[in-house]
Amino acid sequence: MNLRNEKLNKNDFLDLRRDVLADWPTGSEVDLNEIFDYYSNFPEDKFVVNKMLEAKKNFKTLIQPRAGIALPEKFINLLNFLVKEGKADILPITIDSYTRQNKYEEAKKGLEESREVGRSMLDGFPAVNHGIKTCRKISEAIQTPAQVRHGTPDARLLAEITLAGGFTDFEGGGISYNLPYAKKISLENTIKYWQYIDRLIGYYEENGVSINREHFGPLTGTLVPPAISHSVSIIELLLAVEQGVKYVSLGYGQNGNIRQDIAALHSLEELGYEYLEEYGYEDIELTTVFHQWLGGFPQEEAKAYGIISMGAATASLANATKVVVKTPQEALKSPDKDSNAAGLKNTKQILDMLETQSFDKSEEYELEKKMIKKEVKEIIAKVLELGEGDLAEGAVKAFENGIIDIPFSPSQYNSGQMLPARDINGAVRYLNFGKLPFSQEIKQFHREKIEERSVKEKKDAGFQMAIDDIYAIGKGLLNG
């Protein structure tokens, strides 16, 4: 396996860039010296890093929507509307599905059709087709920093274009933007692709331009046990900082049990700093991101607001640096601008009301956090063992052997043997461990939690329990 967790040599990296930039005509617009000169006059408040660090220092939780359309002028109007009406703190540049699959010719056709009919015929912004000038036109027309959100296994050209275009935060990772999204894309390849992206961002850092890197913690967003998403985040964190990344946001997706979600977010940041210290990475700044519920929503908007409000409350009580907001139209259609702003307003109201309130850390909370951290450490230890000390190689082998197993992933590179379900309180547990490398203490802890629910509900602890839990929130419940 020709894969190592080692910083890419500068000359090798620059050689690779020539091939990446040649993949589509807009790649020829990228000139690093011109880019660094452009950023030398960039407003400080347009860097996501600065906004995130200020929020962390002041114990504030920022709000960010999801949004992306094909036509630049309409996109600018939408983004400014979300700031003016929704009070968004960070804006999204959500990329279209064709670009996510590197199908730039199809994206080009969709963009042309959008121009003909005067409205977006794509489900996002085709940044690679638009190129640097259009990206900068958008960046300069908004007064709020913007993050690129996508879901692209091979996002190398996308990163080159959008970072040059004035967007100062890039989401994703070689695992989190592959296995939850793709079926046949090699994990070894995507880790290499994202080593390139992280080396690019590290190169920006070396030249005085700070780009934030966010890791997509929710994964499939479907009953993902915290230790699974945390293990992926820790691996992606360590791979990123090896390439020179200095600012990292660790993400986590709402599961629904408030105590578990808060313990999960707190343990994620603690683990991040612990592993950075263990491996000698210094001067790294971590922030946290809480994603409101990514599973099924009820069709009634009033009920949808309940889910959004619960996510907002959890983010506030957990002191997340940022919360990514859903809309009351999630179950019905792609949200319109008013619905998007409404979700932001709802979330902001909750955050403001809870600003002076805190979460009391009970014994149950401490136990939850302790068990999550223990699970992650057992997984990461096995990953390193499989890689003979190398994290990149170990990550590939870990998925091959089911040591990390993402529930309901479509990827053929994911084992798919682990099965989650909720306990009686709605916390996500392991119904079937698959080949996860857990000690008997951990296995017994989860078995007892599942058994308690099985007895109280007089329901078999089996596959149907997991399926019922997947659809429960959309039907107005937490447990199926």
Image (spheres, grey):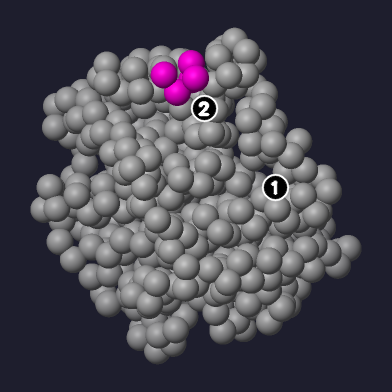
Q: Earlier in the sequence, mark 1 or mark 2?
A: 1
Picture residue at 60% right of the left edge, 47% below the top? 293
Marker disc for residue 415: none
Q: Look at the numbered disc 1 and give the secondary structure of its residue.
A: helix
Residue 284 relative to residue 112: left or right: left
Distance CA(mark 1)–CA(mark 2) = 45 Å
Outermost residue, right side: 117
Residue 260 makes an appearance in the image: yes
Q: Nearer the viewer, residue 161 or 66?
A: 66
Based on the picture, tell me whether residue 449 belongs to the magenta stretch: yes
Q: Are marks 1 and 2 in contact (CB under 8 Å)?
A: no
Picture residue at 67% right of the left edge, 50% below the top? 307
Amino acid of disc 2? Asp
Q: Nearer the viewer, residue 18 or 45?
A: 45
Where does the image place residue 347, in percent across and percent down from the top left?
63, 65
Where does the image place residue 429, in percent across and percent down from the top left?
46, 27
Residue 409 makes an appearance in the image: no
Picture residue at 77% right of the left edge, 63% below the top? 339
Marker disc for residue 423: 2
Based on the picture, tell me whether residue 313 belongs to the magenta stretch: no
Where does the image place residue 22, in percent across and percent down from the top left?
46, 54
Magenta residues, start to end: 448-452
Where does the image place residue 315, in percent across and percent down from the top left?
50, 58
Q: Which residue is mark 1?
A: 106
Which of discs 1 and 2 lies nearer the camera? The answer is 2
Q: Is residue 200 above or below residue 338?
A: above
Picture residue at 23% right of the left edge, 63% below the top? 284
Q: Is residue 258 above or below residue 62?
A: above
Categorize mark 2 by other alpha carbons within 10 Å: few (<14), some (14-19), many (20+): many
Main SS class of the magenta portion in the image? helix
Q: Look at the numbered disc 2 and give the secondary structure of its residue.
A: loop
Amino acid of disc 1? Glu
